[in-house]
Amino acid sequence: MYKIQTLNQISVKGLNQLDREHYEVASDIGRPDALLLRSHKLTNEEIPDSVLAIARAGAGVNNIPLADCTARGIPVFNSPGANANAVKELVAAAMLLGSRGIVEGIEYVHTLDNITDEAELNKILEAQKKQFKGNELAGKTLGVVGLGAIGSMVAEMALTLGMKVCGYDPALSIDAAWRLSSKVEKIDALSTLFARSDYITLHLPVLDSTRGLVNAELLKVARPDACVLNFARQEIVDNEAMVKALENGQIRKYITDFPNPALIGRGDVILMPHIGASTDEAEENCAIMAAEQLRDFLEHGSIRNSVNFPNVLLDQPDGVRLAISNQNVPRMLGGILTVLADENINVIDMLNKSRNDIAYNLIDIECSPSDAVMQRLRETEGVINVRVISS
């Protein structure tokens, strides 16, 4: 029986992926095998020694201490793409809000609550509606920064609206490239994308290389009528530089899902309360993906969509499987196999992959290892943890 501790309210459809015959799931549980969370700010001290894996029902993992988890041999899973459609639809709404005086028009109508005569109301609306005139999206250029699961869907959506689309992503994966329409023009320099785009939408993770990426220098080369949309992460945009760009007329409008005191109250900014993935469908999809990834890891040792471990997928074992994480240094695999060979344990199948400072091994063997073998493996220098998985 595996024990899963939930640190946030998780969609029932996600929890249903963990059958109660093999899983105990609760918010208060002793010595859990895994943690399942959404936005809970997790500290290293909160992670019991029993935890083998952590899964977040969402894309970002800045609320999880990744370095500490990696050092302890704990893979951290996220749910990339599960909320992509929800974010895509909100980006579409944001572009419409940024192209026409929709918000301003709605706010204006609410100021007319003292008028009781419908004819008089219509006369005023006809006279004033010109101040809310905007532009159509068709024919405009959308620059998409980051062409992953969300960015590629946003690009496709913009094409169906009759927009021209250019994209920038120096880390574009092969899978993402296959998903991308040939009509999306690939741009090699971010400054070129900013200079050519009427609308610029950001879809990047927070990394050292992306923190403060949209800065004063980049905003200076943007078109003066450009609208910037940020539904990725607050840290990607330098808010101080953005305010100055708005004040200087370098940027026409900024629309973001990450309110900041410096932005509140500005007429050239539209702020949303972090609702990019706030749909029932997105929460369900994220929970289902996170639960499935925990189940595959606990039952088979498989790793998919980990942000700190390599993807390692090996066919379901017929017998006994060893799941071993170790420091990514030379001769580790040889040392592990030597321990098995010394005990005349035959290896049926295996897969070894590494990612940065961590390596992970799935080794299928003919028979269950003795306590002595397990002790030798755990004492092998560089080995972080060892787990036996039986079919």
Image: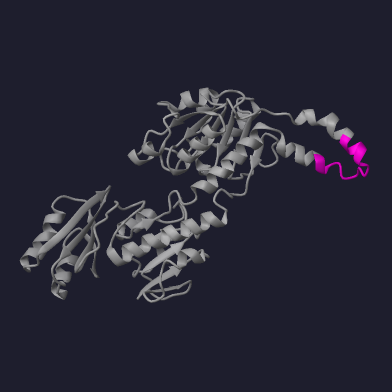
Q: Is residue 102 left or right of residue 149?
A: right
Q: Is residue 125 above or below residue 332?
A: above
On-image quarter of the C terminus: bottom left
On-image quarter of the N terminus: bottom left
Q: Give how far across and how far down residue 389 sits, in percent.
A: 24, 68
Q: Quadrant of residue 223?
A: top right
113 inside magenta stretch: yes
> Residue at image x 93%, y 44%?
116
Q: Could you tell me if residue 109 is visible in this image?
A: yes
Q: Is residue 122 above or below residue 80?
A: above
Q: Give how far across and how far down residue 316 sits, in percent.
A: 25, 63
Q: How many marks?
A: 0
> Residue at image x 87%, y 36%?
122
Q: Quadrant of residue 246?
A: top right
Q: Is residue 266 left or right of residue 257?
A: right
Q: Give how far across and how far down residue 177 sits, in percent.
A: 37, 36
Q: Is residue 144 left or right of residue 225?
A: left
234 inside magenta stretch: no
Q: Could you tell me if residue 42 is visible in this image?
A: no
> Residue at image x 13%, y 73%?
372
> Residue at image x 7%, y 69%?
343
Q: Is residue 18 above or below residue 86?
A: below
Q: How is the image coloured?
A: one colour
User: Which segment did they paint magenta?
Assistant: 109-122
Q: Give how far across and how far down residue 170 sits, in percent.
A: 38, 33
Q: Is residue 280 left or right of residue 15?
A: right
